[in-house]
Image: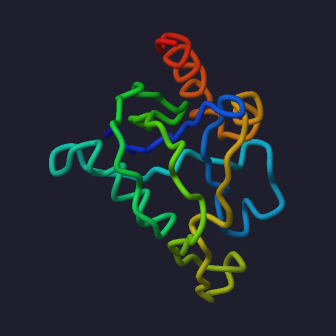
Amino acid sequence: MVVWSAGLLLYRLAPEPQVFLAHMGGPFWAAKDAGAWSIPKGEYDPDGEGALDAARREFREELGVEPPEVEWAELGTFAYLSGKKVVVFAGDGAAFTASGFVFGEFEMQWPPRSGRMASFPEVDRAEWMSLDAARDALVKGQRPAIDALAVALEALPG
């Protein structure tokens, strides 16, 4: 069975094209930077929820702020090697204020096999970065979304 996720990829054009990404939280990602960032996204059931609704919900849950009220364009569906599919929507985030975050949390057994549960933030920071920096920072399965966005931005008038 395919696992589906949906996410919002905010971009802004000045001073250079940039995207807004989130660094994954928890002990596994704490000391990693390259390949440890993600488009704010999460899982959903396509039989019970639309992809854009899920992407907006997950943005709120992960970052603790409302996604901006902008026009969202479906950028594409990107498959991970695991078979998971991520539907990504792009929107102009030039007016988005990247502050006031209250990161959602998850629980897991930590340390492993200890029998103790611990809470960790889903995301531990979020920021704007250039498209080149984003390609290096993102988990491998999401990198094609940056290339798709770059093509879409080149097609913009002006």
Q: How is the image coloured?
A: rainbow
Give the quadrant of the N terminus: top left
* Residue at (41, 52) in percent of width and height: 68
Q: Is residue 112 above or below residue 14?
A: below
Kindly indicate the quadrant of the structure image that contains residue 143. top right
Using the image, determine if residue 130 lies above or below residue 103.
Answer: above
Residue plotted at (47% across, 37% down):
92
Residue lying at 50% horizontally and 72% vertically, measured from the top left: 104
Q: Nearer the viewer, residue 76 or 20?
A: 20
Residue 14 visible within the image: yes
Q: Nearer the viewer, residue 132 or 49?
A: 132
Tally the marks.
0
Q: Position of residue 25 (x, y in %)?
A: 65, 65
**Front in this rendered view, residue 24 or 128:** 128
Instruction: State the residue lying farthest toward the left.
Output: 48
Residue furthest right as drawn: 31
Position of residue 97 in the picture relative to residue 56 (left or right): right
| Residue 12 spot, x, y in % from top left | 58, 36
Q: Position of residue 33 (x, y in %)?
A: 80, 50
Q: Residue at x 16, y 45 (%)?
A: 47
The answer, for residue 85, to whether it is visible in the render is no
Q: Place residue 146 in its image quadrant.
A: top right
Q: Is residue 73 left or right of residue 93?
A: left
Q: Toward which corner of the image does residue 126 lie, by quadrant?
A: bottom right
In the picture provided, is 117 more to the left or to the right than 71? right
Spot the residue most to the bottom.
116
x, y (%) of residue 97? 56, 58
